[in-house]
Image (tube, rainbow, N blue to C red):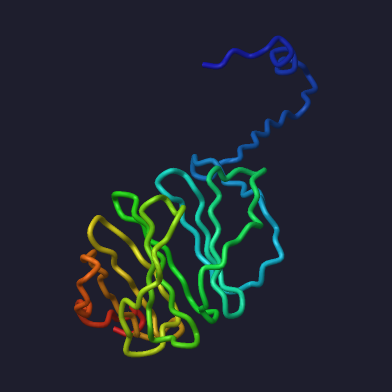
Amino acid sequence: MRTLSAELIAAQKAHTRTPYLQVTISDRLAGIRRLRPVQWYAGAEPDEGHAAIVAADGSLIRVRFNGATLYRSRVTTPTIGSTYSSWTSWGTFTAGVVAFAKDNAGKLWCFVADSATPTQVWASTSTDNGASWSAFTLQFTHSAAVAYISASGKTGSTDIVVRQRPPLHRDLGRRRHQDRPAHHHRPRRRLGRRLEHPHHR
């Protein structure tokens, strides 16, 4: 039971009462505090394909296309005061799609499909949290142009999902990239059938 203050008791007993309204303001939704994004960087980079991932040591790794060049950035201690405008040229790729993946051991992958050769998916890897990367190598050639790409890694392999055409088409494909010795050049085996979009069952 809540104890009323003397003022409220007096107002309750008064012949003329003043309405009382209690307002509670909460910055929560279903008991969860609302996220309030804060802009850390507003650069002048072109709005083209890009991706980002946080490495095992907390570094923020970013990649973006600019015309026919792919650029990468590594910010070791990302905060609101960090420098986000420093980019390193990563190779010649005409603007397309790109995705990062990280396995359980912290190894990073970057997968790229550019618009000049949109059926080809290339990859580069890093074992030092994005400080250095291997040369890009061709991983596989898809049956059609890759319009979207995503990747998820685990120790020893990485799954890559590609979509050939815009949404509402059932053109999803999945491939698995296996870690192999450098001298091993057998083609990667395609896994499973194409996945159907739920609207086209």
| 2 to 27, vertically: above or below | above
Residue visible at 65% across and 50% down in the picture: 83
Closer to the camera in the image, 142 or 161: 142
Q: Residue 61 placed where, x, y %?
A: 50, 56
| 119 to 51, vertically: above or below | below
| 107 to 48, vertically: above or below | above
> Residue 65 lies in what quarter of the image?
bottom right
Task: Tally the marks.
Answer: 0
As drawn, which residue projects farthest toward the bottom? 144
As drawn, which residue projects farthest toward the top? 6
Closer to the camera in the image, 38 or 69: 69
Q: In this view, does 199 lie to the left or right of 177?
A: right
Closer to the camera in the image, 180 or 36: 180
Residue visible at 36% across and 66% down in the picture: 151
Q: Residue 57 placed where, x, y %?
A: 43, 43
Residue visible at 55% across and 50% down in the picture: 75
Q: Residue 37 placed where, x, y %?
A: 62, 49
Q: Residue 84 placed where, x, y %?
A: 63, 54
Q: In this view, does 127 lie to the left or right of 177?
A: right
Closer to the camera in the image, 151 or 120: 120
Residue visible at 50% across and 41% down in the picture: 32
> Residue 125 lies in what quarter of the image?
bottom left
Query: What is the quadrant of the C terminus in the image?
Result: bottom left
